[in-house]
Every structure is written in C-alpha cells, then in structure tokens.
Amino acid sequence: MKNPYFPIPMKVKQAYVETVDRMLRTIELSFLNEEDERAFHFTPGQFCELSILGKGEASFGIASSPTENNSLKFTINKAGVVTTALHHIEEGTEVGVRGPLGNGYPIPLFEGKNVLVIGGGFAFTTLRSLITYFLHPQNRSKVNEITVIYGARMPGLLLYKAELLEWEKRSDIKLVVTVDWGDKDWKGKVGLVPNVLEEVAPSSENSYAVICGPPIMIKFTFPKLMALRFPNERIYTSLEKRMKCGIGKCGRCNIGHLYVCKDGPVFSYAELEKLPKDY
Amino acid sequence: MTLKLDKKDLKAFLETLMDEYDLFAPVQLAEGVSIYKKIDRPDDVDLSTSNPQKPAKEVFFPQSETMFRYEKAGKQQQMTSTEGVEKKRVILGARPCDIQAVSILDDVFLGKEYKDVYYGNKRNGTTLIGLACNHPLSTCFCPSAGGGPFLRKGSDIFLIDLGETFIVELLTEKGMTFQKNKFFKEANTKEISLAQEIEEKASKKADASVPIEGIDRRSDLMMESPFWDRMHEKCIGCGVCTFLCPTCHCFDIVDEALTNKGQRVRNWDSCLFPLYSQETSGHNPRPTGRERTRQRLMHKFNYFPKNFGRVACVGCGRCILYCPVNFDIRQAINLTSAKGIRKVKDQVDLTRR
C-alpha cells in the first residue's frame, strides 16, 4: 500500500520575491529522486501539500505548467506559520511535497473552444499554469482564442511580470492587465476586473470561462459573465478551504458531500449551485 | 458453527491468542469506565461492564498517532515512516454497534479512492471477535440504524454470554481457523436455546423506532432550515460526542518538533471545534454552533449516505449518554420528520415573536 501521507523530498532550486509588498514569493522546487519525478504527472489546477518539517503542512496550487519539466513552482502568500517559513527558506533547502492532489481544470472540455481566463490578485497562480500549458507549441492548437484578464490592486502587486510582458507581445493570446490604481510608470489599464470584463466583452459563444480571485471580485464579476451569456456549466473556478490530509479523509474541507481536496478544488458554477453555501 | 467456551478457560484461551496476535479488549480503568486497550495480562480483560466508553475505532485509528519521524541536518532532511505494524490484531469483546462502525470506517479509510495506510496496516488481517449485547441500555437504538444487539455481521467470531460460559459462533473463514482450538467445545441444545432466549429478550430492549430510514432524502432541503437555530442552542461545543462516536473520523495533522528532529502526528479532531475549519485569513466557513452542529449531523445523515450509501451512525447511544448538556441525537432525528420540522418552526417563530 502506498502511503499518501508521506511526502517526497524536493529541493528549493530558486526562490524570489514577486511583489513590492514582499508578501508573495515564488519558490521553484526540483525533485531529489528520479523515480519521484517520473511518477509525478499533473494537470493545471491541481495542488500540492508542502511540508516544512517541524512547522507543518499547507496546500498550494501548482503555478508551473506540466510542460515545464524538472521543477514545480509555487507562489506563496505570507499568512501563517508554514507560509512564513516558506518565505524564509533558502535555496538548496529540502522540503517535503505531497501531490499532485485534486482534480485540476477540465482541459479536455476546453479543447476546440475559446478560453477566457479571469484572475485577480495572487489567485493567478494556477491560472498561470493553465495559460502556460495552452501556450506551449504542442498544446496551442488545442484551443481557439485565449483571452486573459488579470487584475491586481497596483502595478507592483502583479505576479510573473516578465511573463506578462512576453505574453503581451504574442499574437495568439489576448492579454488585458489592469490595476485598481496605477502609478506614474503605469501605461496599462486602470479599473476593476468586472468593469474591464464588461469593456473587453469576450464572446461567450463556444467559450469557457475560468475565474479565480478574491471573493469580492468573483461576486461582482459573476453577474457580468452572466450578462455575456456564459452558462453556469461553462464557468469554472477553483476553491480554497482549510485542508489537512488532502485526500478526503480528515473531514474539514467538505462542502456538502463533496471534498474540495479530492472532488475539487476546481468546480463549475453549475456544480456549486447544487451545493450548500457552506464556504 | 456453534461451539462454547467455558469462562474458566477464558484466561488460557486469551493467552494462546496473545502468543500469536496483539490482543485488544475492553479494560476497566475505574468503576464502570472501560476502554479498548492492548492486553498484557489476560486478567485485565473486562467483558462484564456494558459497552466501553471509548469505541473500538481506537484500535485502528488511535487518538494520537505518529505518522513519521524526521531529522534535519543543515539543509538536508531525513524522514522515516512509522506505518509498519508488527503483529496481526484481534479485537475481543466489541459490541455489534462498534463492529458495524468498523465497517463504516473501512469505507472511509480503505474505500475506492485513496487508501489510508496507517489504518489499513492495523486493520488488515485483524480478527474481530464480537460480543453479543445482552443488556442494551435505554440510550441504545442500534436496530433503528440497521444493526441490533445480536447482529453478527462483521464479526469473524461471535460470543454470547450465558453466565458461566460463552456460546462461540464461528462466522467467517477467518473465524473457522479457530475451529480446532482446544478450548472450544461442542455446545449442547440447552445452551443454544438459552442463547436464543437471551437474544430475543435483548432484541426487544433496543429502540427500533428512531426514524433513520429515509433521513438522507428528508434532510436534503434542510441546510437553511430554522431547525439548526434550535438544534445548536444548548451545545457547548465540547466535542465529546465526536470523540466517543465510533464512526467519527476527523483528524488534525501537526508536527511536534525539537530543534533538529521531530515527528508528524495525527490527532482526533472535531467538527464542533471553532478552529477546525478556521482559515489562516481569519475566515471561518462554519463560524457558529449552528453551522458546526449542522455539519456533524448532516455529515452523518446526509453527506455520508450520498458518498457511501448508508448513514454514519450505528445507534450506540454514546453521544446521548455522555453529552454534558443532554443533547439527544434521537430527538434531532425525530425532528427531521415532517411533523418534527413543523414543531421546530413553530418554536422558533415563538421565540422570535
């Protein structure tokens, strides 16, 4: 019997702060054992439990794409004990990793469709995984148009800035980056994500929408998606809840009879509609 | 196959068991208080106190359990799993409700998705020797939950206490391996008919009238019901009902650390504790007793049936017996019936007026 609670060892290959408030740090992990690496297959939207031995475990969405070999990337918001330890961790240090866990985005459903990606704040991590996956030469033809709307409170809080610049130059992805308030160097859009969505007004025909962000953003963006006639079955989101085991045993992350850890974290709005509002 | 074991031979029988297995049985800690423990001396086994306070789930799912140990040296670390189990186990003297609960935990821990190796290693190869419940208490309602004081299902061997002797029924292949045991003798017809008499009497005593049948469907639309406003009012959130419940299985995982070494431990947890679902941001999806009581009862009677096809309650009555504020799960179940819902609604309307 394989032990699902026993982490595999990985090493911090690189770690860097992403944002001016220094609250978001990306760490890249490399596998220590080749067999672990060979056995690790994931879909964008899945997550891992990262262990800092002595501090504990916490769950993080995988920010890298399966098309980026050899390493896993996580962007970590400094909030509690484990995340603070991950903010202080030095390159070369070993950490424990359990995963991949959860269901991930329904990639096969998106094939042959337009994909609208809406992200806000640091919820952009697994969306980066999804976008990077589809932008890979092997996968780009799987979907039609890719539209990305990504908002942060201010320019300094945007994640993955170098990549955003690269995506902006490409013709096979429409990227709209917006901030709640700009600064003197900011040439891009200023405005809240729901309003920018209304302005960009992507067609809902033959399209799927994936939306991740703070609850307040989702609350106001959802009606705009409805107005664009996206049906509930074609809007996907990824939920977060307190988790321990990550495999549907320890009990705390359930919404109704479903567990966010193993039945989610990705749900369509049609699925969420049927569940109790217990989150 | 029906045999018997004289009580004077019990000690010797237990000794032979202990040679081969780790034996777990009820042990009396104080007057009227017994729990399941690993037996070192056969004299410690207590089969006379009624159903032990703590359920038999502990044998496979300890209240606190080390998952692995680790050592750190600079940037390196070494982890050693503690999942291994030395000997096969025997549980002796578990009442039918606890045996039924083990099969519910099997669904959770050894179900079709992820297998829980810590539970599985202890559980696999275990022989369950059940003990018929001759004197169900007034809080027992196992027949309402699909069980009964003499339910054999799940036991490999089933004992019935006749006073000076036990009737021994070998029920499964695993049980049949004990057929040649030198302490088991042929039971005579008088003893067999006495056992049947006791069974009939006991079966009448346990309450079969709690309306659990159909509760999963009835509770489907109850999430926002005023029912929960009433239900949680007197609950103080102590969690004793969940710790003593033979089917409750929520746990927490924590690291216990010294400077450079330590261990990862899992401990029983309870959905009635506020910190259980509290997130780092401060947000708590179950902020009050209302949501937490709802989670406990809905998990047992609505969510669990959706996932596993049966309720996660065996009617052992511990949560009723040991609740410090006399919360009665039977009343809660009764109130989910159409008549009950109306009653709660009227009461809530009254208090709001």
Image (cartoon, rainbow, N blue to C red):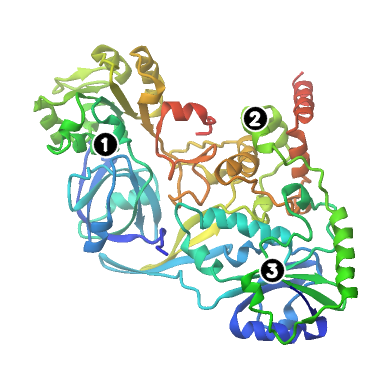
Count of numbered marks: 3
Label 3: which residue? B171
Host chain of mark 3: B
Q: Position of residue B281 (x, y in %)?
A: 43, 38
Residue bearing the label numbered 1: A21
- Residue B197 place in picture, x, y as percent: 90, 64
| Quarter of the image that includes the N terminus of chain B | bottom right
User: Residue A240 at x, y = what percent?
Assistant: 41, 38
Residue shown at the point (82%, 43%) measured from the top left: B209
Could you tell me if the residues under marks 2 and 1 are in contact, i.e. CB atoms within 8 Å? no
Classify mark 1: residues with Cα within 10 Å, few (<14), some (14-19) or many (20+).
Answer: few
The Cα–Cα distance between marks 2 and 3, rounded to whole angstroms, is: 41 Å
Tell me whether the residue at label 1 lies in contact with that at label 3, contact meaning CB atoms closer than 8 angstroms: no
Classify 10 Å Cα crowding around label 3: few (below 14), some (14-19), many (20 and above): some
Q: Amino acid at mark 3?
A: Leu
Query: Hey, which quadrant is residue B59 in on the image?
Result: bottom right
Vertical side of A50 occupied by B72: above or below: below
Tag 1, which secondary structure? loop
Give me the residue at 58% from left, 64% from top. B62
Circle nearer the viewer, 2 or 3: 3
Q: Amino acid at mark 1?
A: Asp
Give the quadrant of residue B72.
Answer: bottom left
